[in-house]
Image (cartoon, coloured by chain):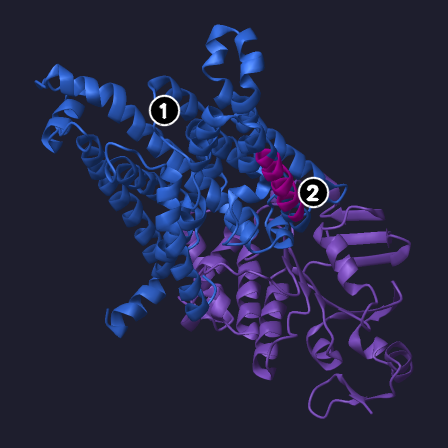
Chain colours: A purple, B blue
Amino acid sequence: MNLSASRLNLDVGNKRLLSNISIEVQPGKMLALMGPNGAGKSSLLKVLAGEHSGFSGELTLNKERYHHWNSSKRARVLGVLPQESSLNFPFTVEEVVLMGRLPHSTSAPHNRAIAYEVMERVDLTHLSQQVYPVLSGGEKQRVQLARVMTQVWEDTGLGPRYFLLDEPTSALDLCHQHQVLRQVQMLAKQGVGVLAVLHDLNLAASYADELVFMDQASVQAKGCPHEVLQPALLSRLYNTVVDVIPHPTQARPLVVAS
Amino acid sequence: MTSYQKATLLTDGGVAKARAWKGQVCVVSLSVVLFVVLLISMATGPLDIPVNTVFSLLVSYIGVDQSVSPAVVQVIESIRLPRAVLGLLVGSALAVSGATIQGVFRNPLADPTLIGVSGGAALAAVTVVVFGHTFIAYLPGWLQNYALLIAAFTGGLLVTLLVSHIATSALGMSISTLLLAGIAIGIITMSGVGVMTYLADDTQLRTLTFWQMGSLGGATWGLVVAAATLIIPACLLMMRYATRLNAMLLGEAEAGHLGVNVQLVRRRLIIFSALAVGASVAVSGMIGFVGLVIPHLVRMTIGPDHRYLLPASALAGALFLLVADMVARTLLSPAEIPIGLVTAIIGGPFFIGLIIYRGQHGAF
């Protein structure tokens, strides 16, 4: 049981966005998708999220072909957090978070209980009555995160759940970056398969179980942080001189750009 | 509310509950007000009928025996009641479609006019008024009376289908193309209306002007039944999509991730609102501002949740049109002002106020 793509190709116009990509999102593991801008990370995430249909290659979700899942059933096991959301209607934070329960036919009190537990975890309880459009960028991003966490919170009997996140920490301050990734990591520990597009190499090194580096539409390297965080690879990918040193207090590498 | 009570509400998860409660209260109180205004509207007119007489008559329909003079019964049953019911239908059709189209376009300032339905209906109706004499005589008798109505409805629907066809490519329907196509086709239909107006003779011109400014004056039970068979199902169907419409406000991709078939839902909602608006334009002419102002006002009161917004808009739209019609037929009595002028005169300044408020209080 996993969410996997093999030999994936995607062309839009005459531009190749994905070239021969094979990737597996395992339940209970957190995978960080990394690489320079324009490498194809978001395109891959969109294919895995079901937004693109014009690709070739094989896509399976929990052993069944991806397109055999109907969209509302798929939404019970697969949550997606997009890079930015343009909601400009005055829903309250709580109403937005509760929308995550739309694919499920659970009772209203049950849904509210989940929404409140999630809001507690991402530090939104004090904002629950606020109107979404007036929130700051970082607060909006946490609301959207809470919405998708609410969507994949419980097992639904359809197999393991998956959570795809496109740059979940981009608008967050240091404290909330760690808070959010801790929550996502906790979901992974409960058996959810996580794939997150991240830019911060050190954040990825401290939370992800596996790192996948993409460049020029294809996968360049994958493995655990110790294996792939190599100065030569990073310097080549990012075209910047990079040093990798042991972290002073934790058992993980620390990347320093110079 | 004390801060302690607020805190309890929060931990209970009671905020959404509180807002839902507000929505329910709004729907119930609007229904009550609507009923009272309906009584008043049937009591108002050239023949003064006391409100309690109207009430007695209505009560007699549900089997309670009441004595009401036949003349009064005649006035209410064949003139005022069909007119009021038509007003209720048209008002709710315009408001519910407005709210739905605003949701589909994810823009609180959108209007059913944007998808071309009013323009198409107007062009077809005007064509029938100007050239009708050349072919109406050949139509079967039962069709002759409804030729204008059927033409307006068909015209509205055809133009909407054309606009959405232009906006749909292999990748699905694009909202911005839909908007542009709607504006372009709107200009074309309006110039068509201009050509027809130019060709019309004096009597036709009077009919045209009256139709373009809207009126409930032609209400008969036949018309009410025709409008109701289209408007009621279309409005109920739009309400069935309320939660999916909520999700679509998050964004198309997001709604898709929540399991909503965005293309399908959007296409259906556009068709349903074209049916409702087409039917109302066909029976009452062009009545502006209801579809824009009413949903906006309701949203400001109870929030954007379509589960409450759509029913409350239906009631508020019906109420607004009933009041506007009362003004239209009593203000310069015995002359009658076109109802479209009344809604525009009330709605226009109101809308400007709303825009100013919006500028000062953020995008609501």
Q: Main secondary structure of the magenta part?
A: helix
Taking B307 as reference, is A167 above or below it?
below
Residue A176: image quadrant is bottom right
Taking A172 as reference, is B218 above or below it?
above
Taking B65 as reference, is B288 above or below it?
below
Say which residue label 1 marks: B218
Quarter of the C terminus of chain B within the rendering: bottom left
- Residue at image coords 66%, 48%: B180
- Could you tell me if the residues under marks 1 and 2 are in contact, i.e. CB atoms within 8 Å? no
Residue range highlighted in magenta: B180-194
Secondary structure under the numbered disc 1 in the rendered image: loop
Amino acid, disc 1? Gly
Could you tell which of marks 1 and 2 lies nearer the N-terminus?
A: 2
Say which chain tag 2 marks.
Answer: B
Q: In x, y percent, where is residue B260?
A: 59, 45
Say which residue label 2 marks: B167
Taking A74 as reference, is B91 above or below it?
above
Q: CA distance from mark 1 to mark 2?
A: 36 Å
Q: In x, y percent, where is residue A189?
A: 62, 66
**Front residue of this view, candidates A45 and B31:** B31
Secondary structure under the numbered disc 2 in the rendered image: helix
**Front residue of this view, candidates B153 and A25:** B153
Is B193 inside the magenta-drawn segment? yes
